[in-house]
């Protein structure tokens, strides 16, 4: 994977001004923080149908965003390399077109707004077919980073701290970032975007905290479906309209399609300061959601959109990460999957909710066309409420798009 400065956008493509950057910066400031990374997609980056994993693209997006944000922070010479960018949120992102094995991914990232301690980075992804000499935009994303002061631990020191139970999660302090000079109207527009995402992050944290319990206050059904508790929960079912004709089959319930991954965070997953890259986590989240979607549809599935990704707590080197995915809503041709990431400090056995996300998947046939998706059958009060909430949001989004 290559990384380089680029003043005019990827070669042979649209200019920087035409890239999806929110249009909120002048040329002189753009050149200071813009970065482009490239990667040739191979078999390890794709599923069995040859489509590049959404998680791989998200990892590239975050890598470019991290470089752009950290380079901007480095313009403050007084910090002397003591601060870096930690990913806090990825806003809604559509996968406009698929990327395939053999395509060259080119990812352009640009800092477009700064608040006291946050940075907005807009990213555009192009897919180049080198054989046909064609280039298309596949993704546009907006990421929010937080300026964090590092305790100046080496990776080895951070690992030692975790081994002793001391940890490093609480040793990172949010600090001020260099101000990006903008015109008055551009500053006001950026401020509005900042307040909007801040409100959305707070709402997401509350929603995912509440989703651990059903609406009647009982504990959420665990992933392990072989327990006595699950058998009791199964008795509390809903009579739902089964337009898909699956006859109420339990294979189309949320629990039957859960996905779960566990991963020990190693130095290769982290920055030099011992904090896990956001892109590494997003790839794990997409993989877990993909497992859930595949179990449910039993066909080739691809990521269609990232509704949002929020990072609530830092994850550090040495943490054990548990990623859980569960379907919460299905429309005629898409399904929404909620993903949570918990980080466990193995030394202290303490666990925190570190990140949460909502991803949309579609099922594809052999011709690459969308398959109908069986209707999800909620089994508890909480599952029904989350289904209804996601359905209302889906309907509002379609109305906004005029569909």
Image (cartoon, grey):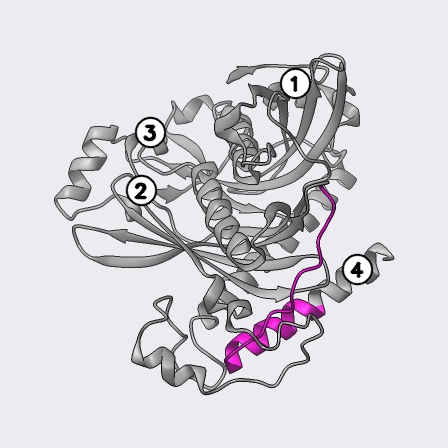
118 to the left or right of 344: right
Q: Is residue 286 above or below residue 134?
A: below
Residue 270 seen in render: no
Q: Position of residue 206 (x, y in %)?
A: 50, 67
Residue 106 seen in render: yes
Instruction: Give the residue displayed 27% in from the left and 53% down from the top.
Output: 344
Q: Residues within 10 Å of mark 2 (few under 14, many from 20)?
A: many
Q: Which residue is mark 2?
A: 316
Residue 189 bears which disc, if any?
Answer: none
Mark 2 vs mark 4: give the one in front: 4
Q: Secondary structure at mark 2?
A: loop
Return the disc, 2 or 4, that comes first in the chain's sequence. 2
Q: Name the image quarter holding the C terminus.
A: bottom right
Q: Which residues are magenta?
A: 368-392
Q: CA distance from mark 3 to mark 4?
A: 41 Å
Q: Which residue is mark 1?
A: 31
Residue 398 bears which disc, if any?
Answer: 4
């Amino acid at each position: 994977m290559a990384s380089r400065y680029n003043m005019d956008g990827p070669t042979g493509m649209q200019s920087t001004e035409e890239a999806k950057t929110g249009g909120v910066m002048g040329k002189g400031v753009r050149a200071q923080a813009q970065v482009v990374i490239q990667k040739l997609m191979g078999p390890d980056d794709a599923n069995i149908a040859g489509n590049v994993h959404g998680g791989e693209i998200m990892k590239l997006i975050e890598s470019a965003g991290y470089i752009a944000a950290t380079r901007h922070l480095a313009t403050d010479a007084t910090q002397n390399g003591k601060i870096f960018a930690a990913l806090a949120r990825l806003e809604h992102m559509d996968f406009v077109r698929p990327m395939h094995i053999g395509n060259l991914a080119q990812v352009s990232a640009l800092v477009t707004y700064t608040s006291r301690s946050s940075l907005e980075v807009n990213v555009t992804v192009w897919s180049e077919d080198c054989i046909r000499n064609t280039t298309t935009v596949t993704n546009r994303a907006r990421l929010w980073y937080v300026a964090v002061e590092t305790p100046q631990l080496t990776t080895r020191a951070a690992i030692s701290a975790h081994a002793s139970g001391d940890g490093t999660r609480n040793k990172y302090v949010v600090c001020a970032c260099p101000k990006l000079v903008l015109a008055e109207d551009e500053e006001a527009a950026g401020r509005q975007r900042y307040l909007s995402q801040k409100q959305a992050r707070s709402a997401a944290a509350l929603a995912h905290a509440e989703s651990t319990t059903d609406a009647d206050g009982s504990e959420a059904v665990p992933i392990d479906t072989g327990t006595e508790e699950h058998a009791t929960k199964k008795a509390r079912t809903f009579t739902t309209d089964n337009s898909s004709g699956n006859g109420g089959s339990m294979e189309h319930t949320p629990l039957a399609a859960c996905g779960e991954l566990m991963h020990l965070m190693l130095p290769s997953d982290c920055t030099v300061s011992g904090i896990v890259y956001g892109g590494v986590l997003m790839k794990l989240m997409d993989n877990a959601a993909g497992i859930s979607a595949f179990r449910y549809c039993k066909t080739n599935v691809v990521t269609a959109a990232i509704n949002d990704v929020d990072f609530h707590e830092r994850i550090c080197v040495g943490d054990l990460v548990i990623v859980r995915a569960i379907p919460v809503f299905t429309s005629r041709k898409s399904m929404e999957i909620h993903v949570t990431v918990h980080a466990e400090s193995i030394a202290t056995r303490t666990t925190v909710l570190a990140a949460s996300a909502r991803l949309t998947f579609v099922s594809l046939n052999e011709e690459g066309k969308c398959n109908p998706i069986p209707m999800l059958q909620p089994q508890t009060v909480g599952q029904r409420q989350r289904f209804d909430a996601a359905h209302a949001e889906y309907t509002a989004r379609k109305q906004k798009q005029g569909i």
